[in-house]
């Protein structure tokens, strides 16, 4: 789940990656969707693997990441320090490649996606669409700086799908009790954004200076204490999930060997 090339991003995860696994616990519902997309693949390369979330237990997996801090937290034994743009593997080395919330960190997205297609016969990519609405209330009401940051990093799902020649694009609405603490995970649990440890596990929060984040969090804290947030978002409190634009893309061969 981390950056996949040199140029600053790996260093970011060398810092925020410490303790990453305590906050970023794989969610079983997202895991089930990813594992279904990988079904039948016996060899898998996980590019931007981070701490190893969502890897299938029934496949031989090689984890690739440019951050040694993240690889040190990975529980597997087959780990490679490398970026997505230059994968050190031959053509068709794997039955499948996976990339979970990492492509937005790649300095050369198209080269990285081309590498996924080169080294594997099936590609499974989980990412976020910056063109999707609605956006998380935290951004609209407290930290619009995240919008500028994320729109500069993320590429539209349509462009990623075209580059991959994806045949399947699946929405993943975020459950209200989602366990993987990335940015939108706490959309119905706003008090969790008050925790600096939780914020630190998000690359968006980590990229913003305290002078921006701390006043915004102070406003959120006050709105929670006064009940303003609860009144403003009463509709959210009754929802089980929200579609915030997260998508799973599948390209290449299926488990039956057809495109």
Image (cartoon, helix red, strand yellow):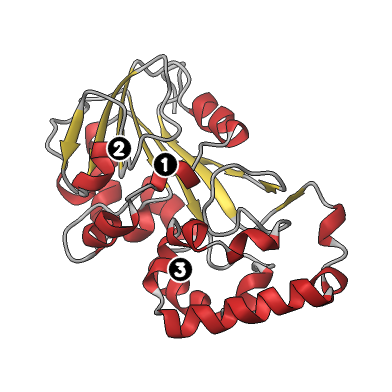
**Numbered disc 2: secondary structure:** helix
- How far apart marks 3 and 1 lie (CA) works out to 17 Å
User: Which residue appears at 45% of the width and 19% of the height?
Assistant: 255
**Numbered disc 1: secondary structure:** helix
Question: Which tag, 3 or 1, sits closer to the chain's start?
Answer: 1
User: Which residue appears at 87% of the width and 65% of the height?
Assistant: 234
Camera-side residue of 126 and 210: 210
Q: Is residue 137 above or below residue 98?
A: below
**Numbered disc 3: secondary structure:** helix
Question: Which tag, 3 or 2, sits closer to the chain's start?
Answer: 2
User: Which residue appears at 64% of the width and 71% of the height?
Assistant: 138
- Position of the C terminus by quadrant: top left
x, y percent for residue 137: 68, 71
The image shows a total of numbered marks equal to 3
- How far apart marks 1 and 2 lie (CA) works out to 7 Å
As drawn, is 26 to the left or to the right of 2? right
Q: Is residue 141 visible to us here?
A: no
As drawn, is 119 to the left or to the right of 248? left
Asked if disc 3 and disc 2 are in contact, CB closer than 8 Å, the reply is no
Dot 1, how many residues are within 10 Å of its Cα: few (below 14), some (14-19), or many (20+)?
Answer: some
Res. 205 mark: 3
Q: Is residue 44 above or below residue 212?
A: above
* Residue on which disc 1 sits: 21
Asked if disc 1 and disc 2 are in contact, CB closer than 8 Å, the reply is yes
Res. 73 mark: 2
Question: Where is residue 21, by image quadrant?
Answer: top left
As drawn, is 53 to the left or to the right of 85? right
- How far apart marks 3 and 2 lie (CA) works out to 21 Å
x, y percent for residue 210: 43, 79
x, y percent for residue 3: 29, 54
């Amino acid at each position: 789940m981390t950056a996949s090339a040199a140029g600053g991003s790996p260093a970011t995860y060398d810092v925020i990656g410490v303790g990453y696994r305590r906050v970023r616990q794989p969610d079983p519902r997202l895991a089930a969707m990813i594992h279904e997309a990988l079904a039948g693949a016996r060899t898998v390369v996980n590019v931007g693997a981070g701490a190893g979330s969502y890897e299938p237990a029934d496949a031989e997996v090689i984890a690739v990441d440019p951050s040694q801090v993240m690889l040190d937290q990975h529980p597997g034994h087959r780990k490679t320090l490398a970026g997505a743009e230059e994968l050190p593997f031959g053509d068709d080395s794997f039955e499948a490649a996976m990339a979970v919330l990492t492509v937005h960190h790649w300095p050369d997205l198209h080269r990285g996606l081309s590498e996924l297609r080169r080294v594997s016969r099936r590609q499974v990519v989980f990412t976020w669409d910056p063109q999707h609405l609605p956006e998380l209330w935290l951004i609209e009401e407290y930290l619009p700086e995240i919008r500028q940051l994320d729109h500069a990093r993320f590429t539209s799902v349509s462009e990623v799908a075209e580059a991959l020649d994806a045949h399947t694009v699946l929405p993943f609405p975020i459950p209200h009790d989602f366990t993987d603490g990335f940015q939108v995970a706490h959309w119905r649990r706003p008090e969790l954004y008050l925790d600096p440890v939780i914020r630190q596990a998000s690359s968006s929060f980590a990229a913003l200076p305290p002078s921006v984040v701390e006043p915004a969090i102070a406003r959120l804290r006050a709105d929670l204490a006064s009940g303003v947030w609860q009144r403003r978002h009463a509709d959210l409190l009754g929802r089980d999930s929200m579609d915030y634009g997260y998508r799973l893309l599948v390209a290449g061969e299926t488990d039956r060997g057809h495109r």
